[in-house]
Amino acid sequence: METWDLDVEQRIDEATSQEEVAKQVGIYAAHCEYTFFGLGLQVPVPPDKTEHIFLSNYPKKWRQEYDTMGYVQNDPVVLHALRSSMPIMWSDLIIESPEQKHVFKKASEFGLVHGITVPYLTHRGIFGLLSLARESRPAFTPAAAIRIKQQLLWLMHLAAEKILSLESNTQEVPKRQLTVREAQCLKLALDGHRINEIAEIMDVSASTVSYFFGQARKKLGVTGRSAILAEALKSGALSVHMVEMSSAPVLTARDNEIDERRHPDRNLASPTERFGRDSRKSPDRRH
């Protein structure tokens, strides 16, 4: 991961509002040579409510038309995200009906022609997606397209976790014991190592290190890297691992060896149920 990417990660991690997170996503979109971005989340709220969050720089008139006309029901981007967790270029989407083709045609009138989307699904029933869009066709090589998809998976996870932590920062979060690898990440951070250095030491990707930090954040019930490290020391969460880590080399792990795997339980509800236009913040077309 480039140093520039790590700077974006730090800014998102230190954000204190959804608007600040959106600003960083927009900056990253521009870095990838995309004009527009849209990030939507559907969050279950017990006992039987759903909160919709949508952040974007899409044209205001397009957002209004999208909601008024109920385009979400025939949006190929949303339909793909409901069926698959794989990133996809809009040019590879399967258009199954005249209604879906019409949504694409109307979006193109607002400059949303070529794009890429990454879905977001979690075991907590949270559904979302991140899309970048532009008017002209990007001159990406196949290798560059794959790299951008990987970057957006990382960015979506990072932004979504931050937004969710901001939403729940007033709630009491149960604290659970850190795994050895999560504790190793925090210990290395305490020693002054940056994300890319921790990834190299542990022989994992930077996104895997970010995942470990995200898990530690949720377990400790705090936001922001400085707060995580302070709480880990204050609560004694690191103490159970300190002796082991001080006398043994850092464990290595590949991306597919993450201790706490997430198993999304996808509820393939209709698009209207996912992103109903009567919600407080309903996602737009061309996510």
Image (cartoon, rainbow, N blue to C red):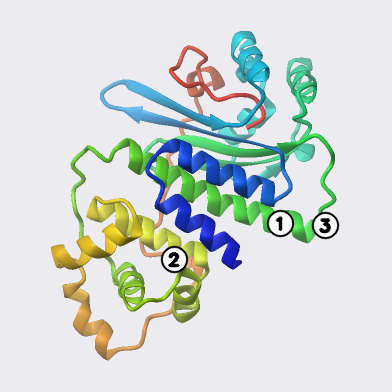
Q: What is the three-letter code of the residue carrying label 1?
A: Ile
Q: Nearer the viewer, residue 24 or 201?
A: 24
Which of the two discs, 1 and 3, labels the residue nearer the N terminus?
A: 3
Which of the two discs, 2 and 3, labels the residue nearer the N terminus?
A: 3
Determine the residue positioned at 54% across, 50% down. 155
What x and y, as percent, mark residue 115? 73, 39
Dot 1: few (<14), some (14–19), or many (≥20) neighbours within 10 Å? some
Q: Nearer the viewer, residue 106 or 126?
A: 106
Contact between marks 2 and 1 (CB within 8 A): the answer is: no
Contact between marks 2 and 3 (CB within 8 A): the answer is: no
The image quadrant that residue 85 belongs to is top right
Secondary element at tag 2: helix
Q: Residue furthest left?
A: 235
Dot 2: few (<14), some (14–19), or many (≥20) neighbours within 10 Å? many
> In this rendering, is residue 278 above or below 190?
above
- Image quadrant containing the N terminus: bottom right
> Which residue is under mark 3?
141
Q: What is the three-letter code of the residue carrying label 2?
A: Val
The image quadrant that residue 61 belongs to is top right
In this rendering, would 86 be left or right of 238?
right
What x and y, as percent, mark residue 128? 51, 35
Q: What is the three-letter code of the residue carrying label 3?
A: Thr
- Image quadrant containing the C terminus: top right
What x and y, as percent, mark residue 159? 48, 46
Q: Nearer the viewer, residue 119 or 164?
A: 164
> Which residue is under mark 1?
146
Determine the residue positioned at 34% across, 60% down. 225
Q: Which mark is residue 209?
A: 2
What x and y, as percent, mark residue 137? 84, 41
